[in-house]
Amino acid sequence: MERYREPTVAAPEEATGEDRALRPQRFEEMVGQRQVMERLLIAVDASRKRQEVLGHILLDGPPGLGKTTFATCIPRELGTTLQIASGAALAAPKDLLPYLTNAVEGSVLFIDEIHRLPIAVEEFLYPAMEDFRVDITLGDGVAARTINMPLRPFTLIGATTRAGLISAPLRDRFQMREHLDFYGVEELAEIVRRSAAKLDMSMDDASADEIARRSRGTPRLANNRLRWIRDYSTSRAANEMNVGVVRTALEMQGIDERGLDGFDRRYLETIHRVFGGGPAGIEAIAHTMSSAPDTLEDDVEPFLLRCELVVRTPRGRRLTALGEEHLGVVRRTDQGRLF
Ligand code: ADP
């Protein structure tokens, strides 16, 4: 019997349908994150062998690295059902309650962006995670009373781009906490080759490597870049695929040889031009760029920090010598030495 049920709420990027085609369905189809995968496999295996419910798991890391993919593969490996919710959409305990009461024994509830849960919902979740029960308050004031409602034991998988925003009581209720890191070029090249095969594209190794190098360490971006190159090749290059086509297509999108896009470079340029290379506070940078600090902290900064193009200091963000080099800036103090 097929016990796996499709997610009740689709992740936003799945609206296109194509991402679903490229998303690995099983652990064995996933590339990279070997250590995380191995630990998760052990936990899943032990839970199956002992017929016990898998402990709660918190996954953190920058967007597009595979948190949702892990969360959807785990119930498949367990042969159980999955429900998907988003922290941002759970405004009150009553929004979370149906997910908890619908959970069948041993099933998985995935809450994406779990750091966005309001505190009232978070507190409602504590007894659900710990004792598989919820406390429901009926009535107001002196007439108010609390009813304990038992739940069927389930596994909560939480995902967050901001582990730092998860409160200690919530964090401590997860038996496993796993951090996903950026992928290496070889791993991304393998993902590109697999995705190309799924999209019926022929792809030589040099092209796959070039896409991988320009994907900011992120499988989602590797797949997005691949789709754009495929469109470009169909429309402008008579379906040809080689390194030249890859470069031209990506340069048309403003993606440079490090994989940074125009927005990444604008962030670096803002620190350089407006703040004299920094240090500059994130709020000030965001304000100058007409962007939100959250967007910069979640989407832009992790990779730039990883590449050491910027550093975070107690007084704010500062461009490094490498960052200046990437922008093609020559330091004034160094200029004299050039001649
Ligand atoms: P997150 O939830 O961390 O934002 P996702 O799990 O949605 O990231 O991953 C984005 C896309 O990247 C997936 O749909 C999938 O196509 C691809 N992907 C992510 N991780 C892997 C992996 N380990 N192997 C192959 N493809 C991956």
Image (tube, rainbow, N blue to C red):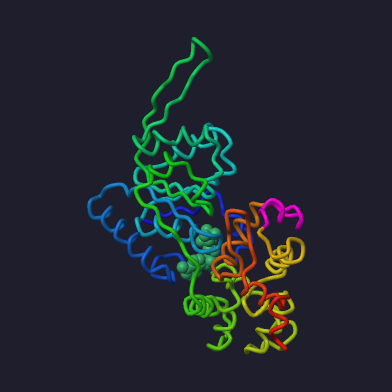
> Is residue 286 found inside the magenta-colored segment of the image?
yes
* Residue 231 in picture, x, y percent from top left: 69, 78
Q: Residue at x 61, y 60 (%)?
A: 299
* Residue 46 in picture, x, y percent from top left: 26, 55
Residue closer to the observer: 252 or 291: 291
Which quadrant would the C terminus be assigned to in this image?
A: bottom right
Q: Residue at x 74, y 78 (%)?
A: 252
Tally the marks.
0
Asked where in the image residue 212 lies, by quadrant, the reply is bottom right
Instruction: Report whether residue 23 is seen.
Output: no
Above or below: residue 294 compared with residue 24: above
Asked where in the image residue 316 lies, by quadrant, the reply is bottom right
Q: Single out the residue that lies furthest toward the top.
A: 142
> Is residue 97 found inside the magenta-colored segment of the image?
no
Residue closer to the observer: 225 or 99: 225
Instruction: Report whether residue 46 is seen.
Output: yes
Residue closer to the observer: 137 or 114: 114
Residue range (magenta): 280-292
Left or right position of 317 against 29: right
Above or below: residue 235 compared with residue 180: below
Above or below: residue 219 compared with residue 275: below
Q: Residue at x 41, y 46 (%)?
A: 156
* Residue 328 in picture, x, y percent from top left: 71, 78
Left or right position of 6 against 40: right
Residue closer to the observer: 264 or 17: 264
* Residue 1 in picture, x, y percent from top left: 36, 56
Q: Residue at x 56, y 86 (%)?
A: 203
Above or below: residue 215 compared with residue 302: below
